[in-house]
Amino acid sequence: MSDVLAPLMTLPGVADAAEAARDALAKAHRHRTNLRNWPVTAAESAIRGARSSSALDGGAVQLDASGTEPNDPVLAGALRVGQALEGGTTNLVGVWQRAPLQALARLHALAAADLVDGDLLGRPRQNPEVAARLDLVTRLTTGRSSAPAPVLAAVAHGELLALAPFGPGDGVVARAVSRLVTMATGLDPHGLGVPEVYWMRRADEYRDRAQAFATGDPPAVGAWLLMSCQAFEDGAREAMSIADAAAK
């Protein structure tokens, strides 16, 4: 089967942006704090990512007055997802590599536990087109394409936003899958980067580019890929700042 993602690498700027994202994340992993104490950065990354992802879906960004529990169901779900992915040591990485649809179901069960009835958790809409598209996307992003990891993560993210396969929780799941792909491919094995902060700070642009990506128009697809790669690069700088603070 031909690599249907290969043409994406010919879009203007994409190859260079993917390489810049890879270099930035590699640098974050080489930070002196992250050579041994990377779990500190990973834990803070998971929290910042969850709060930012929650905000993008209209949820809260802060815990309750006690500072221990989220009052908001979207934030609660995002934090559960972040904890499940924290540090890249989770078995979800292995599940994603072996059975990505199972990993998707697990992520939705965590993200939407307080948003939908239990019998709807982890169950995509019963639609042949959705099922076929999910199967294609998960196969392409788990070894059926030679596209670089930043592009694979961006495609998975954009496709899941476009498909909205579950309903409530889809945004948190899509961004979690982007993070999961970066871990599984070795781009960001410990989950140190925080691309969600970049997307949150540009929420309107993020939504506009995601909607345009869904049209399949090449310039729009390229713009989404470039934004995603920039988010990974910026997220690596966020990881460096976390590590710098931890080193003091």
Image (cartoon, grey):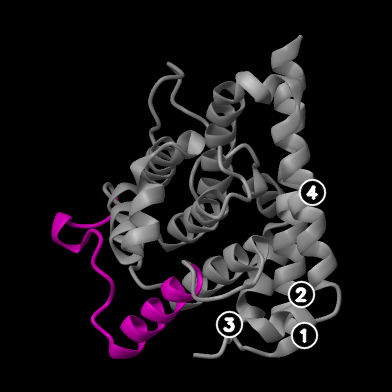
Do tag 2 and tag 3 residues touch (Cβ < 8 Å)? no
Residue drawn where x is 44% and y is 41% of the image: 85
Region rendered in magenta: 115-141
Numbered badge on residue 23: 4
The residue that mark 2 highlights is 223
Mark 4, secondary structure of its residue? helix
Mark 1, secondary structure of its residue? helix
- Which of the two residues, 23 or 1, is positioned nearer the viewer here? 1
The residue that mark 1 highlights is 219
- The alpha-carbon separation of the residues under discs 3 and 4 comes to 28 Å
- Frontmost of labels 4 and 2 is 4
Residue drawn where x is 51% and y is 53% of the image: 58
**Percent from the top left, x then y, of residue 32?**
75, 21
Q: Residues within 10 Å of mark 2 (few under 14, many from 20)?
A: some
Is residue 234 shown in magenta?
no
Q: Residues within 10 Å of mark 3 (few under 14, many from 20)?
A: some
Disc 1 residue type (three-letter): Pro
The residue that mark 3 highlights is 214
Disc 3 residue type (three-letter): Ala
Do tag 1 and tag 2 residues touch (Cβ < 8 Å)? yes
